[in-house]
Image: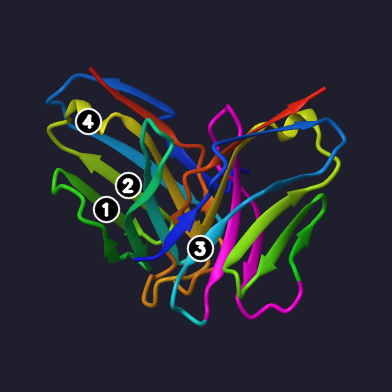
């Protein structure tokens, strides 16, 4: 079974600073994707960023970037210039798993709190 | 227009009742999913349908029965509700089953009393 680990139950950051949310994964697949989702207190799941295992460059989407280190099997999310609206729960996920048929395996989540 | 919409957003019901949650996506995606988020916020897949055909059933009790009348809809029917079924249920869709990103609905918070 594929495994995703987020070791930080909670993180705090000052507004306008950068923050890194950790994610490690375990798979024997060669081809897989890594995803980050944001879940604000309102409850919806918002897709943030995607990294393919064969992508040579780290993915970026606005203030979000994914620090992908394949050999270490890590896919950390970096949020630059944090805003109060970034306070939320963040989930790392992967679709690794051979014939996973697109299903996502999620980590435990990290609660990010942005202080003014 | 909401891409993936679920109804209802909140559902409070008594043990033993039967209830349904509806999901529709207007993205033209082929694959739809149901995920369950428990009280500890852990998300786990329940079912996946590709073009109306069931392709994943993750050891979910058979009280849960998904139904896909067409590829834009995936409904979840739950029989004989139990206290432990209380959770947030998310519908999601992706372009196909090869693993592109999934877009989620807003979730349905089910409370069984």
Q: For the point 63% across and 81% down, which residue is it?
A: A54
Secondary structure at numbered mark 2: strand
Residue range in magenta is A31-57
Is the Cβ of the residue at disc 2 closer than 8 Å to that at disc 1?
A: yes
Q: Quadrant of the N terminus of chain B?
A: top right
Q: CA distance from mark 3 to mark 1?
A: 32 Å
Q: Earlier in the sequence, mark 2 or mark 4?
A: 2
Same chain for mark 3 and mark 1? The answer is no
The chain that hosts pointer 4 is B
Q: Position of residue A20 (x, y in %)?
A: 72, 48
Name the residue beneath numbered marker 4: B84
Residue at (53%, 67%) from the top-left corner? B95
Q: B82 or A84: which is nearer to us? A: A84
Query: Which quadrant of the structure image shows residue A12?
Result: top right
Could you tell me if residue A104 is visible in this image? Answer: no
Q: Chain of mark 1?
A: B
According to the picture, the residue beneath numbered tag 1 turns out to be: B67
Q: Residues within 10 Å of mark 2 (few under 14, many from 20)?
A: many
Distance between the Cα atoms at labels 4 and 3?
29 Å
Q: Are marks 2 and 4 in contact (CB under 8 Å)?
A: no
Q: Residues within 10 Å of mark 3 (few under 14, many from 20)?
A: many
- Mark 2–mark 4 Cα distance, whole angstroms, equals 20 Å
Q: Which residue is mark 3?
A: A25
Asked if residue A23 lies left or right of residue B39, the reply is right
Camera-side residue: A98 or B9? A98
Pinpoint residue A109: horizontal percent, then vertical percent. 52, 42
For the residue labelled by badge 1, is the local secondary structure a helix, a strand or a loop? strand
Badge nearest the viewer, 2 or 3: 3
The residue drawn where x is 39% and y is 77% is: A98
């Amino acid at each position: 079974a594929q495994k995703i680990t987020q070791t930080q139950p909670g993180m705090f950051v000052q507004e306008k600073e950068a923050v890194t949310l950790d994610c490690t994964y375990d798979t024997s697949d060669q081809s897989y994707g890594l995803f980050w989702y944001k879940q604000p207190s309102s409850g919806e799941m918002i897709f943030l960023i995607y990294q393919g295992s064969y992508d040579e460059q780290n993915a970026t989407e606005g203030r979000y970037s994914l620090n992908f280190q394949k050999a270490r099997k890590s896919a950390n999310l970096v949020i630059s210039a944090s805003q109060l609206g970034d306070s939320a729960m963040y989930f790392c996920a992967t679709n690794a798993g051979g014939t996973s048929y697109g299903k996502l395996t999620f980590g435990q989540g990290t609660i990010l709190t942005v202080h003014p | 227009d909401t891409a993936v919409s679920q109804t209802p957003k909140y559902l409070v019901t008594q043990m033993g009742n039967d209830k349904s949650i509806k999901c529709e996506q207007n993205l033209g995606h082929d694959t739809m999913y149901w995920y369950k988020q428990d009280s500890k916020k852990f998300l786990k897949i329940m079912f996946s349908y590709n073009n109306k055909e069931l392709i994943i059933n993750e050891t979910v009790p058979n009280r849960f029965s998904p139904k896909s009348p067409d590829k834009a809809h995936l409904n979840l029917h739950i029989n004989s509700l139990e206290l432990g079924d209380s959770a947030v249920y998310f519908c999601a869709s992706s372009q196909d089953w090869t693993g592109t990103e999934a877009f989620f609905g807003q979730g349905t918070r089910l409370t069984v009393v």
